[in-house]
Amino acid sequence: MTNIDLQAQPHRRFNALSGDWVQVSPHRMQRPWQGQLDPPTVETRPQHDAQCYLCPGNERAAGQKNPAYEDVFVFDNDFAALLDDGRDSQADTESPLLRAAPVRGTCRVMCFSPRHDLTLAAMQAQEIETVIRCWGAQVRELRPRYRWVQVFENKGAMMGCSNPHPHGQIWALDALPNEALREQNTQATYFADMKRTLLRDYVALECERQERIVEADDHWVALVPFWAVWPFEILLAPREPVAHLDDLSPLLQSSLARVMQRLLRRYDALFSTSFPYSMGWHGAPGEASADHWHLHAHFYPPLLRSASIRKFMVGYELLAEAQRDLTPEQAAARLRQLPAE
Ligand code: H2U
Ligand code: ZN
């Protein structure tokens, strides 16, 4: 038996959280980083944009007027993907090949700041803490009524985000979506065997190894997971198990604000650009026991080599499985070298 050289040989890695495999081809990255330098993208935006449907005091598409909010502001999405019409329809099982199931839910939009020109990365830790508390309050309100509450941020035009005003979304529904179901199964199985959460053990292991850690304090760890698919993907989790986003103590909230701020500033420094990504929280579904579930956030940024060169999930990845050249260890090392202030 020979051990795989993870920095030199093609190999596949297993995602313990999702149950997927990813192919890694590090031999294509043997050359040292040439540091392609894009000129820094300087985008100047006004603090208030009269055309923005998220800025305080402005009118939205359906005619409602935003209040003169001073920190965060949540409203029902005017074009909600889920409806809460209360109808109790049955699953459609006319044929096993034509299955459909009803879904009921609600969609909200959350402005992170009244300032049109800010991003989470540019906000003060105190302001990020306010966002974190608002996320918690939303989850606390929605969790008893829905099986899954998805808090997320889609940032940057590259991610299809329609408006640069700092904002995220919350979708809550009475079903477990695919990713939730997968993580539910892997974490429940691990907990049944080990009596500890999968991510508690994983985070502890990564803290021993150090090679994939990007940011950490006494409570939170941000790392490029061993099984990362996106070049600069991050998994952010508390060291000790917490089931829900609304279970965070004030200490964990303020620690999280600082860790997120430092992580996002490293992201922005990487390609001298306001770094695009999709991020979101996975907390325990609204079912009875949540002992197995370990709260975490995923950050999925599309960029690969510069502010404009992105990774595409095409060809082999669509038809067979995800693949990467840059190893997660190399990605973590690059992020660690950048300024977090
Ligand atoms: P994105 O930029 O991530 O697409 O989010 C903006 C959301 O805001 C989007 O879901 C909603 C869109 O439906 N929206 C409103 O609810 N009201 C508006 O007036 C415009 C956009
Ligand atoms: Zn705005």
Image (cartoon, rainbow, N blue to C red):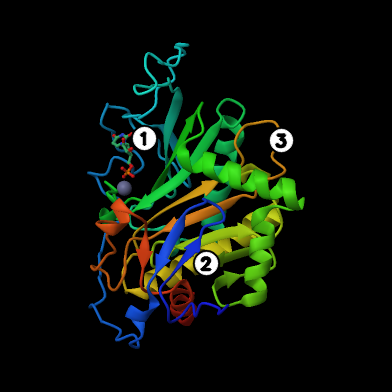
Q: Is residue 273 placed above or below 35 in the rendered structure? A: above
Image point 64% across, 43% down: which residue? 244
Residue under pointer 3 = 289
Q: Disc count in the image?
A: 3
Q: Residues within 10 Å of mark 3 (few under 14, many from 20)?
A: few
Is residue 166 visible in the rendered image? The answer is no
Q: Residues within 10 Å of mark 2 (few under 14, many from 20)?
A: some
Residue kind at label 1, given as amino acid type: Asn
Is residue 333 visible in the rendered image? The answer is yes
Q: Earlier in the sequence, mark 3 or mark 1?
A: 1
**What SS does tag 3 mark?**
loop
Image-based side of 270 in relation to 195, left or right:
left
The CB of the residue at mark 3 lies under 8 Å from ligand 1:
no
Image-based side of 37 in relation to 145, left or right:
left
Residue kind at label 3, given as amino acid type: Ser
Image point 39% across, 47% down: which residue? 167
Residue under pointer 1 = 66
User: How far apart are the alpha carbons under marks 3 and 2?
Assistant: 28 Å
Of residue 189 and residue 302, the one placed in the foreground of this image is 189
Q: Earlier in the sequence, mark 2 or mark 1?
A: 1
Image point 42% across, 21% down: which residue? 101
| Circle number at residue 29 | none
Q: Earlier in the sequence, mark 3 or mark 2?
A: 2
Question: Which image quadrant shows ligand 1?
Answer: top left
User: How far apart are the alpha carbons under marks 3 and 1?
Assistant: 39 Å
Q: Residues within 10 Å of mark 1 (few under 14, many from 20)?
A: some
Residue 99 falls in image quadrant: top left
**What SS does tag 2 mark?**
loop
Residue under pointer 2 = 226
Measured as percent of width and height from the top left, residue 323 is found at: 36, 64
Q: Nearer the viewer, mark 3 or mark 1?
A: 3
